[in-house]
Amino acid sequence: MKTILSFFATIFFSLSALPQSSAELTCRAQAKEIALQTYSSCITEARNSQVDEIRKNYQKELADLKAKYDQELKKMGSVGPKKAQTAPAVKVQKAPVAAKGIAKQLPGKAPVASDDAMPVQTVSEGTKVVAVGTEESSDALEKEAADADQVEIIEMPVE
């Protein structure tokens, strides 16, 4: 009997604790939303300030390191007997940049000499065929296969 009475008492007190009107529910929902926005903006600002601090420290350390190695390079440059003994200049070539959808260069074909031509033979179905070629023709095929690997395929935009 006591458990039933305590059960009803618990239900009665929980019902009295519920919000009394829809206005109160709306206000609570708005308060939660505002609190969430405030919290997220505070966290975002804190993270942004940490990122800015890390960037400043990185720039400072980078400038210090650059100054250190610039000084060492100056020392090495003044100590050497001849300043003209630097490494030879390396010529840097840029790869051709393809425009969007347009190939700059088509793959080349291996030149075929008339004396390298193989005779053509017709074979009926079911007959075993063995291809015999010279070493030069296999080199040309390998070169053509290597050239085919270097071709860049660009897909055209579809309208």
Image (spheres, helix red, strand yellow):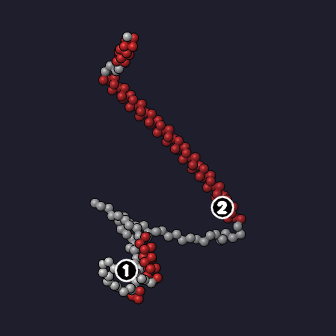
Q: Residue furthest bottom?
A: 115
Closer to the camera in the image, 111 or 73: 111
Q: With 65 as the anchor, is 136 left or right in this view?
A: left
Q: Which residue is mark 2?
A: 73
Vertically, is 145 above or below 68?
below
x 52%, y 69%: residue: 92
Vertically, is 43 above or below 146?
above
Percent position (x, y) of residue 22? 30, 23
Name the mark nearer the viewer: 2 or 1.
1
Number of labels in the image equals 2
In which image quadrant can residue 17 be found? top left
Q: Which mark is residue 94?
A: none
Percent position (x, y) of residue 100? 36, 64
Could you tell me which secondary element the residue under label 2 belongs to? helix
Q: Quadrant of the C terminus?
A: bottom left
**Does label 2 or label 1 sit earlier along the sequence?**
2
Separation of residues labelled 2 and 1 (CA atoms)? 68 Å
x 32%, y 82%: residue: 123
Label 2 close to label 1 by CB (< 8 Å): no
Closer to the camera in the image, 151 or 33: 151
Q: Which residue is mark 1?
A: 129
Percent position (x, y) of residue 48? 49, 42
x 45%, y 33%: residue: 39
Vertically, is 4 above or below 128?
above
Closer to the camera in the image, 87 or 135: 135
Could you tell me which secondary element the residue under label 1 belongs to? loop
What amino acid is labelled 2 in the image? Leu
In which image quadrant can residue 88 be found? bottom right
Q: With 16 as the anchor, is 143 left or right in this view?
A: right
What amino acid is labelled 1 in the image? Val
Q: Residues within 10 Å of mark 1 (few under 14, many from 20)?
A: few
